[in-house]
Image (cartoon, grey):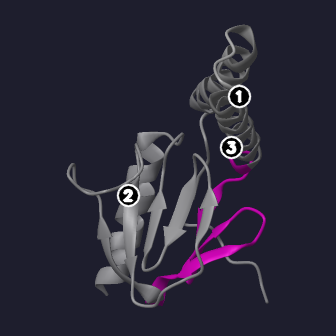
């Protein structure tokens, strides 16, 4: 398979990436600290520790996921490691409106065929026949990518 020239690229901005990581990591650390600093009953303490540990896991997944970017080519939307999110011929429509259920600074792709559920926190998610792109990405780059996808889907 030959390399295709990218039409648009989208990656997390450093400032938003750091802020999002710090916010989720801070939440996890505070929940764990609260569980031991002012211990409630054992059940609530266990709940706080598990919730805090879950937030720390999500923070690490966010840190790793936002190291990767997205690339739009003539045939598909993929991440920079080569994992294909969807082919362009599988996209039925794109939602970019203010009232669309979409990530911050992003857009949602409605697909013809369902895909496996997946999530790269802060960058993209896929659930059933929808892919949400955005989160800690710059709005200008996301808007350009959405416009390029819309142009190719209309054909």
In primary-sequence order, the first of circles 3 and 1 is: 1
Magenta part of the chain:
65-89
Q: Is residue 70 above or below residue 75?
A: above
Quadrant of residue 8 within the rendered picture: bottom right
| Residue under pointer 1 | 42
Label 3 element class: helix
Residue 86 belongs to magenta span:
yes
Left or right of 111 on screen, residue 96: left
- Residue 3: give x, y in percent of width and height: 75, 78
Q: Is residue 8 visible?
A: no
Q: Is residue 84 above or below residue 13?
A: below
117 or 100, which lies in front? 117
Instruction: Write down the residue under mark 3.
Output: 58
Are the residues flagged by discs 3 and 2 in contact, CB closer than 8 Å? no
Q: Does the segment drawn in magenta span residue 32? A: no
Considering only order in the chain, which callout, 1 or 2, is on the residue closer to the N terminus? 1
Disc with the residue nearer the chain's start (3 vs 2): 3
The residue at 78%/65% (across/down) is: 81
On screen, residue 91 versus residue 33, left or right, reads left
Of the two numbered discs 3 and 2 in the rendering, the one whose residue sits closer to the viewer:
3
Cα separation between marks 3 and 1? 24 Å
Image mark for residue 107:
2
Q: Secondary structure at mark 2?
A: strand
Q: Secondary structure at mark 1?
A: helix
Quarter holding the N terminus is: bottom right
Q: Residue at x 72, y 73 (%)?
A: 83
């Amino acid at each position: 398979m030959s390399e295709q020239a990218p039409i648009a690229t989208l990656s997390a901005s450093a400032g938003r990436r750091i802020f999002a990581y710090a916010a989720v990591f801070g939440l996890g650390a505070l929940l764990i600290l609260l569980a031991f600093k002012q211990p409630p009953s054992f059940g609530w303490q266990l709940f706080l520790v598990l919730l805090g540990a879950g937030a720390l896991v999500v923070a690490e997944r966010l840190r790793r996921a936002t190291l990767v970017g997205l690339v739009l080519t003539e045939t598909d939307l993929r991440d920079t490691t080569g994992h294909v999110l969807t082919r362009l011929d599988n996209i039925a429509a794109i939602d970019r409106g203010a009232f669309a259920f979409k990530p911050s600074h992003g857009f949602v792709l409605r697909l013809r065929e369902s895909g496996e559920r997946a999530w790269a926190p802060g960058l993209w998610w896929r659930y059933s026949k929808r892919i949400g792109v955005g989160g800690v990405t710059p709005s200008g780059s996301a808007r350009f990518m959405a416009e390029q996808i819309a142009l190719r889907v209309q054909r």
